[in-house]
Image (cartoon, rainbow, N blue to C red):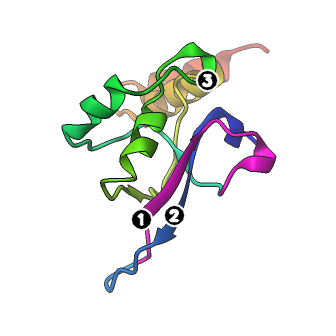
Amino acid sequence: ERISSYGVISGTPQPHPNGPDRLYKIADLIEKPPVDQAPSNLAIIGRYILEPQIFKALETTQAGKGGEIQLTDALRAMLHTHPIYGYRIEGTRYDTGDKLGFLTATVEFALRRPDLGPAFRAYLKSLKL
């Protein structure tokens, strides 16, 4: 239901003999599509390994959503001349660009730290809410 907050890919899983198919050859990228127009539920979460050609693509990319030049649009233009791959990551993802996501990440990581966790846990339990 939150897919319209992210860039989204359509792609084909690339078989891997030693594990789950997490690598995708990307066929298309769309920046913040409406839910009913998203090609998949595979969101782009902003972790990239980019080749130098991205700079030329960015120079010719027109402003898109929100009047900003979108990296997703530059990558989409590069699809015509360069293969692009994505990797489906497993694990917990914290959206620290969102206020609640930032707070959630801060609390969870603080509780895991041996130097902060016990005192922070005691503090949280002491709150009279």
Is 11 on the left or on the right of 101, as rendered? left
- Write the residue at 45% across / 32% down: 109
Residue 65 — which label?
3
Residue where numbered disc 2 is placed: 11
Q: Looking at the figure, which quarter contains the C terminus?
A: top right
Can you give x and y, in whole percent of width and height, for residue 17 in the image? 32, 86
Helix, strand, or loop for circle 3? helix
Look at the picture and state if 75 lies above or below 60. Answer: below
Residue where numbered disc 1 is placed: 25
Can you give x and y, in whole percent of width and height, for residue 49 in the image? 27, 44
Magenta-drawn segment: 20-39
Front residue (pair 92, 21): 21
User: Tag 1: residue type?
Assistant: Lys
Q: Looking at the figure, which quarter contains the N terminus?
A: top right
Q: Quadrant of residue 34?
A: top right
Do residues under tags 2 and 1 come within 8 Å of each other at their CB atoms?
yes
User: Tag 2: residue type?
Assistant: Gly
- Write the residue at 52% across / 42% down: 93
Helix, strand, or loop for circle 2? strand
Q: Indicate yes or no whether the magenta region holds residue 106.
A: no
Is 26 on the left or on the right of 59, as rendered? right
Q: CA distance from mark 3 to mark 2?
A: 22 Å
- Write the residue at 31% across / 83% down: 18
User: Tag 3: residue type?
Assistant: Lys
Q: Indicate yes or no whether the magenta region holds residue 26.
A: yes
Q: CA distance from mark 2 to mark 1?
A: 5 Å
Q: Quadrant of residue 31?
A: top right
